Amino acid sequence: MELNIQTAEQALKEASEANPGAWVDHSRYVAEACKNIALRCNQLSADLAYIFGLLHDIGRYAGVSSEKHLIDGYRYCMEREWEKAAQICISHSFMIQDINTSIGKFDISDDDYLFMKKFIADAVYDDYDRLVQLCDALAMPTGFCLLEKRFVDVTIRYGIHPATIDRWKKTLEIKALFEKEIGCSIYTLLPGIVENSFR
C-alpha cells in the first residue's frame, strides 16, 4: 500500500476508532509541527515529515499500552511496507539510542524486548527521526507547547527515571540543530503555542 497523506490520515482515522483517546489529537499536532519545521529545511519533504508525525503513535490502535505501542506501530507499518514510518514508531521514543533510557513500562514479550533493544542500537537515524522526536515533545493533545511544559507533563505521568535529564538534554540539542538549520526559533512556526503553553 502506497504511503501518502491520504493513506496516513485514513490509518489514523481507523486507529482512532479502534482506540479513541487524547493520543489522536497529539499525533495531529506532532504532524503539523513536523510539517511546519520541514518547510524551512531544504533537505526534508514537508509531506513526508507530516506523514511520519501522524503515524508515530499509530501502534496505539491496539489499545491502551506503554512501550507495547512502539512494537505494535512498527508491525502495523511493516505489514504495509512503510519501512521508515515503522522505524519512527520505535525511534521517536529513543532520542538516545539505548533501550535502557526508556521511561515507560515494557509490557511486551522477552523476544520483543530483545528485538527492540537490537533495533534501537542498530538504527541509523536521519533528520526525520530527529524531527519526530523533537515534535513529539512540542505537542500536547490541546495544541503546541514549550518543550519544558511537555517535559513536566510526561514526567508527572511516567515519573522520574535515571535517564530523564539526559533525554531532556538530547531533545534540547535536537532543537538547537533544527534552529541552526532554519535560522529562527522553532516556536515561531507553531501557531497558538503561547496560549496553549500558559493556559
Image (cartoon, rainbow, N blue to C red):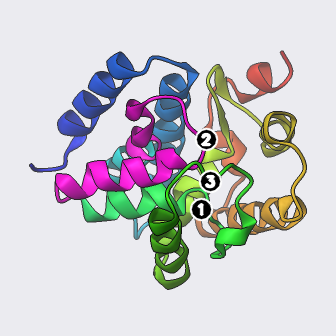
In the displayed structure image, the side of residue 89 where residue 162 appears, left or right: right
* Image: 118 above or below 3: below
- List the residue tagged with mark 3: 106
Residue 116 in the image, given as x and y percentages of width and height: 49, 69
User: How far apart are labels 2 and 3 at the CA level?
Assistant: 35 Å
Residue 184 in the image, given as x and y percentages of width and height: 69, 56
Over which residues does the magenta segment extend?
Answer: 54-81
User: Residue 189, which numbered label?
Assistant: 2
Which residue occupies 38% across, 31% down? 61
Q: Tell me whether the residue at label 2 lies in contact with that at label 1, contact meaning CB atoms closer than 8 angstroms.
A: yes
Mark 3 Cα shell of 10 Å, populated few (<14), some (14-19), many (≥20) = some
Residue 131 in the image, given as x and y percentages of width and height: 54, 58
Amino acid type indicated by mark 1: Ile
User: Residue 182, which numbered label?
Assistant: 1
Mark 1 secondary-structure assignment: helix
Which residue occupies 62% across, 53% down? 106
Mark 2 secondary-structure assignment: helix
Say which label, 2 or 1, has the lower sequence index: 1
